[in-house]
Image (spheres, coloured by chain):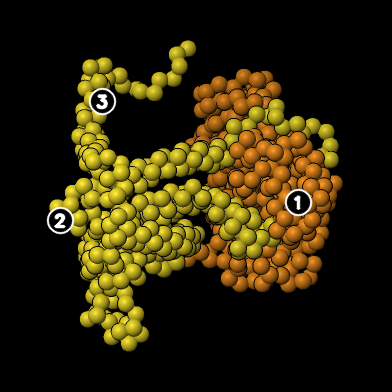
Amino acid sequence: MSIHARGISKAFGSFRALDDVSLDVADGALVALLGPSGSGKTTLLRIIAGLESADAGTIEEDGVDITDRHARQREVGFVFQHYALFRHMSVFENVAFGLRVRKVPGPEVTARVEELLRLVRLDGLGGRRPAQLSGGQRQRVALARALAIRPKILLLDEPFGALDAKVRVELRQWLRRLHDEIGMTSVFVTHDQEEAFELADEVVVMNHGRIEQRGTPDAVFDHPATPFVMDFLGNVNVFHGRVENGRAFWHGIPIELPDCPEGQAQEARVYLRPHELDIRRAAGPAGPARVGSAANGGTNGGTSLPASVLRVVRSGAITRVACRPHGSESELHVDLPAETARSLALEPGQEISITPRRARVFLPGPEYEI
Amino acid sequence: MHAPRRHTVDAPAAWSAALVAAAAAIVGLFIVVPLAAVFAEAFADGASAWWAALVHDPDTRHAIWLSLTVAPVAVAVNTIFGVAAAWLIARFRFPGRSLLISLVDVPFSVSPVVAGLALVLIFGRLGLLGPTLAWLQWKIIFAWPGLVLATTFVTLPLVVRELIPVMEAIGPDEEMAAVSLGAGGWQVFTRITLPNIRWALLHGIVLANARAMGEFGAVYVVSGHIAGATDTMPLRVEKLFQEYRTPASMAVASVLAGLALVTLVAKFVIERRMEAESRDLAAARTVEDSPSQDNLQGSAA
């Protein structure tokens, strides 16, 4: 079942939670709504479920307008952030609830609930109370309960938010497999980009009640459409530079912008991802070293930036290096594979040269990338 | 390792013993001894005299009967109002919400006598609605409806006050989940909301009932103290006492005191259940996950 939300707006008092948002979800797709808290992603999910009403806009399922349909008639499975399991009922009765209120005959309820408990690997735990389950188990009860009514759409609000890291990863992979098997149109909300990129077919990045960008995980990660997306998708180094005659200048290093029209010099922001920077030991105190590796492809003229190391922190498989470019007040962060960092034998105070493999420049107008 | 200690500061043993003794002395002197005195006085002439004092005087009999009919009606009104108001206040944000929360508390801050007088001013013969009520031939003041009104007024906050914090702590998610699973409004209320608030509701009802049975001031004003007609148990105690019939007065008082003891036990049991439920709620919110319990290897189905 496909979903089409058109021109959805919603305000809570003076706060605009959603501002003319349109979203299409294809039949059978698994879509992530990704954004910081307050970006409107949960509100959009609740409006699709009918748990919240929009101030403006329409919701369609397979081309049928369901905007005015009550939540209880929408046939939407909703998994709440804290699961919202019925505390005074057993696991079995939790899963059976949607069938009981539909007056499904008893034997049929039993068969369906047992089938679902097997599906979510909780067979034998039907008699337990929610309080007696682990977080991951509760999450799966919530999922089974939502699936019991054979919904046409599955909506999940921060489905893994309350779980610890290891269970989160396991459950995420399991949910992906489950989705591939039952093929139900699903939308989930998350503020965790790793979760969104690993699980979803399509990622919708939201901010301030608007959609910033949507696309496949690769497209969004490799081609962030706006400074916000760039910023949100990971620590990023941001510098103020200048754009002049088709080139951006970052600390004097020219970065070619092939599509940028020749024109007046203007201010621009230069974004550099920590893992897209290379470090070399400075040849000597004489100044900038020439770097000619294949990685930088000459797009930035092969010029590198002299800097001194401030801190070196090992974080698992990568090593984070904080350094300060000469003549600059701000810090620059570089992520290196631990191996590379070890062979460079970096330590605070050391002189290095930095080469960007990639950079993005956002102007007040259109976007240019190298 | 040492077991975790509950007290971070160790008071010297002598000090803590002295404090415990002082607390016990105060509770004993001001609560236990007076209550015991009531029972001692009531049973001074034996159980049969006590029983006779309660049932052989028709006015006393009527007073007991009146209390047993006024209190449940007032409590029932309070229960319905309390659940509705708590639901409104806990689940919705609307203009005037904080004003409503404050108004609900007014009966706690107004003297019951003032409350009684206010009712007389509105429903009395010379009151605001007096002529209308006279035309309808409805008698409210100096009659049973007035007693119910006064009792309802003074017990009004008890149920609401119990329910609001509990409903706010539970949150609307379970109700929303029930709606998304296809439950209608009444199904949500009876299957989700009511089971979740049942102990808090019962606690409120027990407290409201105790207060309703024992109310004196507001009822005194609206009753007109007509023996055998509008005297409730507390009014009867006072009247018998004024008439120097102390043993009879103490017999009725002992019934009220016994009721208080029953309330105390009920309250204790209910509070234990509420604590257990709030522990469950806290447990449901925290996640202490052991990955070993989650066997998710292999295919999903």
Q: Residue at x 41, y 68 (%)?
A: B95
The x and y percentages for residue A210 are: 61, 61
Tint applied to chain A in the drawing? orange
Which residue in the structure is indicated by mark 3?
B20
* Three-letter code for the amino acid on which mark 1 is drawn: Leu
Indicate the chain on which mark 3 is placed: B
Q: In this view, does A67 lie above or below B159?
A: below
Q: Which residue is drawn at 64% across and 39% down?
A: A129
Which residue in the structure is indicated by mark 1?
A147
Q: Is residue A102 above or below residue A283?
A: below
How crowded pointer 2 is (Cα within 10 Å; few <14, some 14-19, many 20+) is rated as: few
Q: Is residue B247 left or right of residue A83?
A: left
How crowded pointer 1 is (Cα within 10 Å; few <14, some 14-19, many 20+) is rated as: many
Q: In this view, does B236 lie to the left or right of A90?
A: left
Which residue in the structure is indicated by mark 2?
B242
Q: How far apart are marks 1 and 3 (CA)?
A: 58 Å
Labels 3 and 2 within one chain = yes
Circle 2: element type: helix
User: Which chain is assigned yellow?
Assistant: B
* Three-letter code for the amino acid on which mark 2 is drawn: Gln
